[in-house]
Amino acid sequence: MATKNEFKRVDGRKLDEMRAITAKVGVVPNADGSAMFAFGDTVAIAAVYGPRLLHPQHMQNPQKGILRVAYDLMSFSVYERKRPGPSRRSKEISKVTEWALEPAVDLKAFPNTVIDVQIYILQADAGTRTAGINAASMALAHAGIPMKDLICSVAPGKNGQAIISDLNKEEEDYDEGEGATDFAVAKLANQDEYTLMQMDGKIQPERVKEILDIAEKNCETIYDAQKKALKEVVNPEGKK
Amino acid sequence: MENEIKEAPEAVNKPNSSSSKRKVVVPGETIVDGEDYLPGEGTRREGSKIVASKFGLAEEAGRVIKLISIFGAFVPRRNNVVIGRVSDITHAGWLIDIDSASSAFLPIEESPRFINRNEMDQYLAIGDVISAKIWTVKGKGIDLTLKGKGLGKLENGFIFRIIPSRVPRVIGREGSMVNLIKERTDCSITVGQNGWIWIRGQSIETEIKARKAVEFVANKVHVSGLTEKVEAWFEEND
């Protein structure tokens, strides 16, 4: 009897509905580019500095610039205070974020330099890496860096047998049936090219297609929010 | 203290007909669709479409689509006049911080008069501010020169920063905007392409007023007929 359509989400969202999106550009005045992106209670800010001189010098590449991402949770962003400073988890997420963003950025234009992207999670309620990537992509654009496209990122997944979009913390901790699956995806907004794909949990190979369909649909919504936020920073009070 | 402006300043005071064709675009966004158009700076062709490669203002100049950045760090080009601060003295010249990705070097030969190598800090000491012209941009590093009109050590007054991509706007067409501010405040102003601006006036009040005027211009991204707006701003604040 129980079909997937009858699955009730904890916060009453539709299966393919994301949490409310908030996007804002220009939140860090001293950075060359910055942005905030929130999925419901997950809030990420990203600041971009550079292109600037890269130290240590041996890391410099005369053929192309380097993208250096630092992702971290603020110590107050989770229920139990997080010990500040890099951890195994934050280093890994920094690296995958770097790989997710790099295909969009034209690094050949800035040899021997570095573009620093700093992502901080102010409030964590699952899906922090995807919110971080969305914020970072807006911040890179805001910094005037040549890019192929914007990057949109969302983490659909699965609770038991039901495919759902943008899991929150409670859904991520779901433990009935097959448990929770978290499938983080990032893609170029206007192309069918994925730059990040990570999965945590179980899923049948044939159901991955369903996840990607939801991701693609959600990414369009995210892209519109990113576009709107970027355009607002040019003309905050509307046309005069 | 005139600046040479080699790059055409963006259309600050163009008639309204052209300003209506400018629009804000994000990377990857299609600006126009059609084989007739040509991709200019900051854009690329994808099939029949012209697509933005940067975040900025897209503008049609005949058949060519141009994209002007409105945010971002300074990208040095030859013949740019920049303002910098001496950060080190070596045996062959000075190291100058011009707020760009690669460091800038001012060789001792490029100063307008002879300098004894043992007394280099008498001419330019660490922390001194200069306006200089970019002589070459090589893979690694920038060479500067002080040979040219209006270049040299900047004394008294103060410097502050604006977003480098707004510099053409502050200078205006053939310097019209900066000249207007100079006239109205009676200050000397040097605008560096790297976004550093140096102001010296008769009194601190006029200097602050000049700074506010410059910031007023730099913060107006989207407005056409900016000269009139600045005139009006001066009327209000006199």
Image: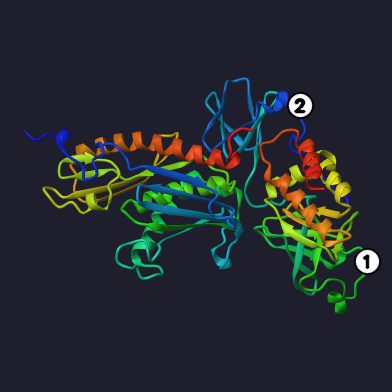
Pointer 2 chain: B
Q: Residues within 10 Å of mark 2 (few under 14, many from 20)?
A: few
Query: Left or right: B210 with respect to A159?
Result: right
Which residue is tagged 2?
A: B15
Q: Is residue A31 above or below residue A216?
A: below
Marks 2 and 1, the one that precedes in the sequence: 2
At horizontal 64% and vertical 33% (from top left) the residue drawn is A240
Q: Secondary structure at mark 1?
A: loop
Task: Please name whichever residue, B203 or A159, is drawn nearer the observer in this view of the structure.
Answer: B203
Q: Is residue A148 visible?
A: yes
Q: Residue at horizontal 15%, vertical 52%?
A: A175
Give the side of residue B20 with respect to residue B202, left or right: left
Q: Position of residue B150 (x, y in %)?
A: 89, 55
Q: Is residue B133 above or below residue A8?
A: below
Which label sits on residue B12?
A: none
Which amino acid, mark 1?
Arg
Vertical side of A132 occupied by A149: above or below: above
> For the residues marked 2 and 1, what is the alpha-carbon distance in whole angstroms?
46 Å
Camera-nearest residue between A145 and B198: B198
Which quadrant of the structure image shows residue B50?
top right
Residue that carries the numbered disc 1 in the rendered image: B113
Assess whether mark 1 and mark 2 are in contact (beta carbons under 8 angstroms).
no
Q: Residue B185: x, y in percent?
A: 86, 51
The amino acid pointed to by label 2 is: Pro
